[in-house]
Image (cartoon, helix red, strand yellow):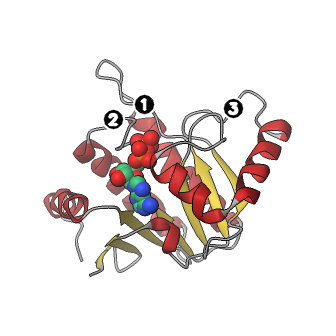
Amino acid sequence: MTRTLFDQQLHVIQGDITRLRVDAIVNAANHSLMGGGGVDGAIHRAAGPNLKKACRELRETDWPDGLPDGEVALTDGFELPARYVIHTVGPVHAKTKDKSHLLAGCYRNAMRLAAEKGCESLAFPAISTGVYGYPFEEAAEVVLDVMRDRLPHHEALTVTLCFFSEEDVSAFLAVAERAGAVD
Ligand code: ADP
């Protein structure tokens, strides 16, 4: 079931992001861009070996020191149903340091890049909330703030938040309801 927010410009679903037929999906990558576990591994497996090749080229040409937290880099989707993959690096959560601006940067920069490439549909996984340890509800508040702020600037763009579990969908919607953001 899809829940919509912000005048239907934001969709919240449970699913496997590698299956989505959208213009671009976002990858919660790591600095190396060379693939890893979690959603990164799933995207690399589904996109096929050409994705790793494209990422290696990006490293060599644009990001020799690796992709910094909050930045974005674009590749094709290769064997994915999505046309593009926007790779971003979420922050590793730290109790003593507020990294919400870096997490917000992932979402904001991916939306900007998608719009620049003429995308009308963009899907995000729950960046940083897996092995990078960002508390889910804190991340949800960051995402809602960015969506409220940036969606009006990208009127042609529909964003899907693709959560891997129903628990994450419910947890996100609870935060959204508290924030008065559900349609
Ligand atoms: P990070 O390192 O940024 O924390 P992870 O890949 O560990 O990234 O986790 C991010 C989120 O992606 C987690 O909520 C995880 O359950 C989810 N996830 C893993 N595989 C998929 C997938 N195929 N589609 C959508 N979400 C996924």
Mark 1–mark 2 distance (CA, rounded to whole Å)? 6 Å
Quick one: label 3 or label 1, which is nearer the N terminus?
3
Q: Examine the rendered structure and indicate whether residue 28 appears above or below residue 70.
A: below
Q: What residue sits right under mark 2 in the picture?
A: 133
Mark 3–mark 2 distance (CA, rounded to whole Å)? 21 Å
Note whether ligand 1 is within 8 Å of mark 1.
yes
Question: Depth check: 123 or 19 in front?
Answer: 19
Quick one: label 3 or label 2, which is nearer the N terminus?
3
Q: What residue sits right under mark 3 in the picture?
A: 66
Residue 89 in sight from this viewpoint: yes
Question: Depth check: 148 or 141 in front?
Answer: 141
Q: Which label is found at residue 92?
A: 1
- Looking at the image, residue 65 sits to the left or right of residue 11; the answer is right
Screen quadrant of the C terminus: bottom left
Mark 3–mark 1 distance (CA, rounded to whole Å)? 15 Å
Q: Secondary structure at mark 1?
A: loop
Q: Amino acid at mark 3?
A: Gly
Q: Amino acid at mark 1?
A: Val
Note whether ligand 1 is within 8 Å of mark 2.
yes
| Residue 163 position within the rendered picture, expressed as x and y whole percent measured from the top left | 34, 62
